[in-house]
Image (cartoon, rainbow, N blue to C red):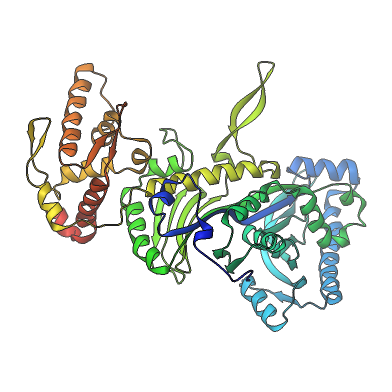
């Protein structure tokens, strides 16, 4: 989708606090923080087995064994209603008994039947979903929630506000609804209304005439009247259920099932990003530890942390290389779009892993306290705050990556003695395991982000501090000598008016090159034999 075709780099000067964009400002022309894919789920108020059985006994006043035949007819009514809706809109209705690529099917339908708005298609698929079963035993039968295969209806719309989206409803009780929207599609329509020029490819913008105005529009997305919008989408697919009084009296409760929030950096040309992107990926693979990833996501590594923190890199993907850092069922990704856009994306599936500030009653007084983030749509703006901060922490940690590469002459100088405060310091053996351990300790993403303390390096090299005071002092002195050694060779510098240190640009380039050479270029068998 294209807006105004005129585009000038000077009109898109960025104003951002991101260290990454400031460092690579000559190569970057625009940045945009925006929601990408968002999946909402609507649940009817039948939460537990006990609640359901009490409802059937006390409200419907029917035998429990009669409940499933009672709601089975509603399932068929939903399917018949979907067929009628598709026929009225002259849209195809297709049934699949097997797993299928629904997006590809919809794209094929749009190519065959181009349209600007309205119902695109209705797809009926067999999927395993949560529904109700009857357990027989001694005494009365019991209804309980369990998963079973059933028909699921997908209504694909071209919505005037949200573009291509879909509403999914399971045809068996409790008729759970899922609504999928894309923040980039929504923003494209907002920019068209505001007459802002842009060029869109898939779910990314490869040109923006007014990035600041586009960012202001994108920031409105989480504060839309979502409950009202989602209820309207639900009414479009639940027409056969409106005649059932006990269902009509119960409104859907909407939660955020999955939210993707991206930070896009638009580069001037493909050559600029192609030269930088492999270095970013290598740095993230080599230097970002589990503690760093947790820090980016607003967490701390705690001995009681129950879960996995994993990093995976796929270089054989058809779109291109992608690196993903996973913390339980939430993850942080980095990849490029069309060779022009560097995208960092936070995906939140388990919001209670994050903590946000909310008002709570404590000791009879209302206070602002840190609480786990909930899935309700009222927390949509909290999702943005958490994901926005994670993306920016990640990019700022990558800002230490330098464009120039190490030269032979620079590496040779490190092996020679150097002076520091009128004292002679030894040369460095760059491939030695002890030196490599020190390099990796000071190159940790969290430390590069906040500054390096003597205690941080000591913990990274030697583990937890001993209880004996004299042993702790000896360890502190030993680390001080190592820091002085790196400072003597210009690899680190002291931060003024503090007890922290930072890695210099020279240090980042040379130490990264040394770590890369040992762990990526040398065969592991030779390394193990040594």
Q: Position of residue 196 (x, y in %)?
A: 65, 62
Q: Position of residue 28 (x, y in %)?
A: 44, 58
Residue toward you, 219 or 12? 12
Which residue shows up at 77% across the image and 56% down it? 175
> Residue farthest to the front?
10
> Residue farthest to the bottom?
112
Which residue shows up at 52% across the image and 58% down it? 12
Q: Is residue 197 among what the camera can see? A: yes
Looking at the rendering, which quadrant does residue 406 occupy? bottom left
Classify 395 as above or below 6: above
Q: Is residue 309 among what the camera can see? A: no
Left/right placement of residue 243 relative to residue 169 reads: right
Classify 514 as above or below 107: above
Left/right placement of residue 489 relative to residue 286 reads: left
Q: Position of residue 390 (x, y in %)?
A: 49, 45
Residue toward you, 413 or 258? 413
- Disc tally is 0
Residue toward you, 92 or 150? 92
Residue toward you, 456 or 191? 191
Looking at the rendering, which quadrant does residue 280 occupy? bottom left
Q: Position of residue 327 (x, y in %)?
A: 47, 46
Q: Which image quarter holds the N terminus?
A: bottom right
Looking at the rendering, which quadrant does residue 184 occupy? bottom right
Which residue shows up at 27% across the image and 47% down it? 505
């Amino acid at each position: 989708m294209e807006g105004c075709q005129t585009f000038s780099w000077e009109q898109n000067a960025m104003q951002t606090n991101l260290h990454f964009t400031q460092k690579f400002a000559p190569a970057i022309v625009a940045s945009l923080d925006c929601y990408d894919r968002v999946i909402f789920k609507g649940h009817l108020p039948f939460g537990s087995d006990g609640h359901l059985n009490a409802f059937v006994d006390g409200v419907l006043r029917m035998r429990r064994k009669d409940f499933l035949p009672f709601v089975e007819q509603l399932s068929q009514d939903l399917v018949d209603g979907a067929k009628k809706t598709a026929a009225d809109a002259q849209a195809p209705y297709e049934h699949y008994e097997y797993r299928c690529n629904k997006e590809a099917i919809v794209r094929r339908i749009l190519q065959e039947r181009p349209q600007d708005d309205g119902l695109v298609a209705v797809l009926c698929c067999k999927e395993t979903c949560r529904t109700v079963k009857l357990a027989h035993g001694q005494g009365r039968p019991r209804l309980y929630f369990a998963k079973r295969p059933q028909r699921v209806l997908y209504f694909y719309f071209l919505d005037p506000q949200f573009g291509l989206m879909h509403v999914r409803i399971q045809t068996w009780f409790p008729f759970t609804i899922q609504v999928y929207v894309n923040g980039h599609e929504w923003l494209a329509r907002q920019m068209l209304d505001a007459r802002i020029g842009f060029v869109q490819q898939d779910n990314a913008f490869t040109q923006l005439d007014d990035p600041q105005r586009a960012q202001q529009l994108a920031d409105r997305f989480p504060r839309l009247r979502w409950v009202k919008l989602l209820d309207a989408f639900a009414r479009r697919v639940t027409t056969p259920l409106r005649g059932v009084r006990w269902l009509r009296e119960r409104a859907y409760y909407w939660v955020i099932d999955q939210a993707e929030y991206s930070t896009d950096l638009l580069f001037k040309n493909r050559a600029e990003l192609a030269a930088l992107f492999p270095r970013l990926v290598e740095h993230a693979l080599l230097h970002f530890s589990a503690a760093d990833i947790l820090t980016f996501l607003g967490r701390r590594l705690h001995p009681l942390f129950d879960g996995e923190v994993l990093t995976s890199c796929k270089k054989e993907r058809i779109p291109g290389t992608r690196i993903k850092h996973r913390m339980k069922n939430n993850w942080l990704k980095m990849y490029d779009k069309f060779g022009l856009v560097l995208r960092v994306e936070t995906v939140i599936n388990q919001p209670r892993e994050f903590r946000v500030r909310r008002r709570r009653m404590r000791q009879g007084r209302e206070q602002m306290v840190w609480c786990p983030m909930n899935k309700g749509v009222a927390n949509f703006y909290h999702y943005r705050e958490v994901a926005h901060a994670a993306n920016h922490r990640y990019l700022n940690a990558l800002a230490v990556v330098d464009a120039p590469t190490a030269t032979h002459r620079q590496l040779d100088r490190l092996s020679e003695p150097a002076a520091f405060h009128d004292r002679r310091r030894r040369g460095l053996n760059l491939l030695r395991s002890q030196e490599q351990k020190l390099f990796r300790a000071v190159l940790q993403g969290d430390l590069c982000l906040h500054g390096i303390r003597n205690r941080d390096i000591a913990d990274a090299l030697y583990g937890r501090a001993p209880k004996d005071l004299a042993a702790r002092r000896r360890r502190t002195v030993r680390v001080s000598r190592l820091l002085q050694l790196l400072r003597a060779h210009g690899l680190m510098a002291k931060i003024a008016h503090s007890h922290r240190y930072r890695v210099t640009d020279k240090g980042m380039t040379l130490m990264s090159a040394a770590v890369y050479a040992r762990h990526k270029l040398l065969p592991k068998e030779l390394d193990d034999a040594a």
